[in-house]
Image: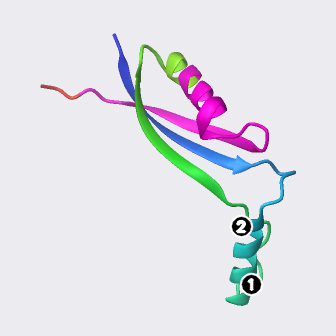
Amino acid sequence: MTHKYKAQIYVTLRPSVLDPAGVAVESGLHQLGYEGVEDVRIGKYIELSLTAASEAEASTQLDQMCDQLLANPVIENYCFELTEVAAAVG
């Protein structure tokens, strides 16, 4: 039996990697008067649905997807949230 899952994936630059977009946004926020803002980092948010036999299998597939395509493991970290989608009653 297969289950359907919804995944929310967050990809961010590793802390040691310079984030020029984050620096630009931080500067812009300061210019707008938000002086208390610090350490702005820009990332990616990805949402997808997938079908798998179990939550463990879905998690393994997501790890592989992130390592192979969705994130660059050399300079980015990722994490994800996985939620099972209730089957429609028909």
Q: Quadrant of the image for the N terminus?
A: top left
Q: Secondary structure at mark 2?
A: helix
Vertical relation: 32 (above or below) 51: below
Residue lying at 74% horizontally and 36% vertically, measured from the top left = 73
Residue at image mark 1: 30
Residue at image mark 2: 21
- Residue 5, by quadrant, is top left
Q: Residue flagged by tag 2: what amino acid is it? A: Ala
Farthest residue in the right direction?
Answer: 16
Residue 63 magenta-drawn?
Answer: yes
Residue lying at 72% horizontally and 89% vertically, measured from the top left = 31
Crowd around label 1: few <14 · some 14–19 · many ≥20 (10 Å): some
Residue 26 location, x and y as percent?
74, 75
Residue lying at 36% horizontally and 20% vertically, measured from the top left = 3
Q: Is residue 64 left or right of residue 30?
A: left
Q: Secondary structure at mark 1?
A: helix
Q: Residue flagged by tag 1: what amino acid is it? A: His
Vertical relation: 61 (above or below) 6: above
Disc nearest the viewer among 1 and 2: 2
Residue 48 magenta-drawn?
Answer: no
Q: Which residue is at the front of the view, 90 or 50?
A: 50
Query: What is the number of the mark on residue 88?
Result: none
Residue lying at 17% horizontally and 26% vertically, measured from the top left = 89
Residue 4 location, x and y as percent?
36, 26
Farthest residue in the left direction?
Answer: 90
The residues colored magenta run 60-87
